[in-house]
Image (cartoon, rainbow, N blue to C red):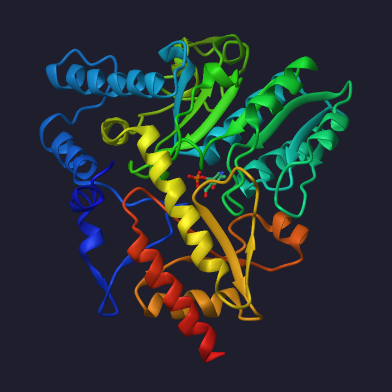
Amino acid sequence: MIDIQKIRQDFPILQREVYGKPLIYFDNAATTQKPRQVVESIVDEYYSVNANVHRGVHFLSQQATELHEGSREAVSKFINARSISEVVFTRGTTESINLLAFSFGEEFMQEGDEVIISTMEHHSNIVPWQLLAARKGIAIKVIPINAKGELLMDEYEKLFSERTKLVSVTHVSNVLGTVNPVKELIRIAHDHEVPVLIDGAQSVPHMQVDVQELDADFYAFSSHKMYGPTGIGVLYGKENWLDRLPPYQGGGEMIQHVSFERTTFNELPFKFEAGTPDYIGTTALAKALDYMTAIGLDKIAIYEHELTRYATERLKAIEGLRIYGEAEHKGSVISFLVGDIHHFDMGTLLDRLGIAVRTGHHCAQPLMQRFGIEGTVRASFAVYNTKEEVDVLTQGIERVSRMF
Ligand code: PLP
């Protein structure tokens, strides 16, 4: 059992009030709150270790480098990468996907080649491929979903052709909560000798992810959605793939030798990390990983699953409430609408009760079109949320419904 009250003590923001009401923070899929351990790491490093990393001969620079590279090691262990060379630090999932779309597109895709994505992708796993399509004339194929919000696996298999070069699919939908069968998706792609990028923005914060067990070729995620700081993310890539990809940006750090005639690039993972990295952020990310590991990823998953089950049951009992996303395997996200109440009105009125939910298209407009809606209200949970908070949400929705 996890001691939720003890965990809540680590998050000072959860003690605050909004409009005179205790804050109930249900916008965790957008970003999670940060525990003291993470915030204090940022202050401590600036106060006592701050120096630019790599190549510094002086004490502070070496200490800062050790912390930064130690964090890479921590990330590598957390997702069970084979080596630290496979862990590229980026600004977040969005940059990780853009990096791959650019570099993979440059090296391995020609006009007429195809990438497979799905109906439930976040814009950050759609638009980079559209930019590549505009630049190189590639085609985007889309895996359809059923009414429950599950991928149609038979249709997926049919999308492969001689021209398929990459599959890029989300592990967990940020709107529907669907946990996709990524191991199976990867196996099928590999049968066609096609590599796979998994968008792990909504999975790594909530479950144990083992990139080797999944056999993912690339895996992207963001620190800020898993109790870590903003501005840091990861692109995991198998070494044999990363080795063959060209750099994404040029500058310091990513080179081995520069002359005006010819420049050679640094080894992995530095080839993809131009400029001064956010070494303060990576240390804080490592603290967030420690924090999650200390609670236990299995325990976090079980707790959040039960909380989501409870919330689903309570919400479903509300007259006129429709849930979008009823997949058999679901993460801790619930999207809903009530009667003909606009999602924006519901969100605004819940906010007045101290309840932070997200409203709108959740950066997944094609998915909204699939369901014929403009947006939803979304409640998404983290390990510090409680059933009592879900009860307040339920009462809040009922109260707002009565007003219309
Ligand atoms: N992919 C999914 C599934 C997401 O939910 C998000 C953010 O909500 C992203 C990608 C983009 O993440 P970031 O804004 O941290 O780059």
- Is 8 on the left-hand or right-hand side of 356? left
Numbered disc total: 0
In depth, the one of 401 and 130 nearer the eye is 401
Residue drawn at x 68%, y 48% as measured from the top left: 120
Question: To which quarter of the image does residue 194 belong?
Answer: top right
Does residue 356 lie above or below 286 as drawn? below
Residue drawn at x 61%, y 14% as measured from the top left: 241
Q: Position of residue 361 (x, y in %)?
A: 62, 62
- Quadrant containing the C terminus is bottom right
Does residue 240 lie above or below 148 as drawn? above
Q: Position of residue 397 (x, y in %)?
A: 48, 77
Question: To which quarter of the image does residue 218 belong?
Answer: top right
Residue drawn at x 47%, y 52% as measured from the top left: 29
- Is 150 on the left-hand or right-hand side of 89? right
Q: Position of residue 83 (x, y in %)?
A: 43, 11
- Is 122 on the left-hand or right-hand side of 117? left
- Quadrant containing the N terminus is top left
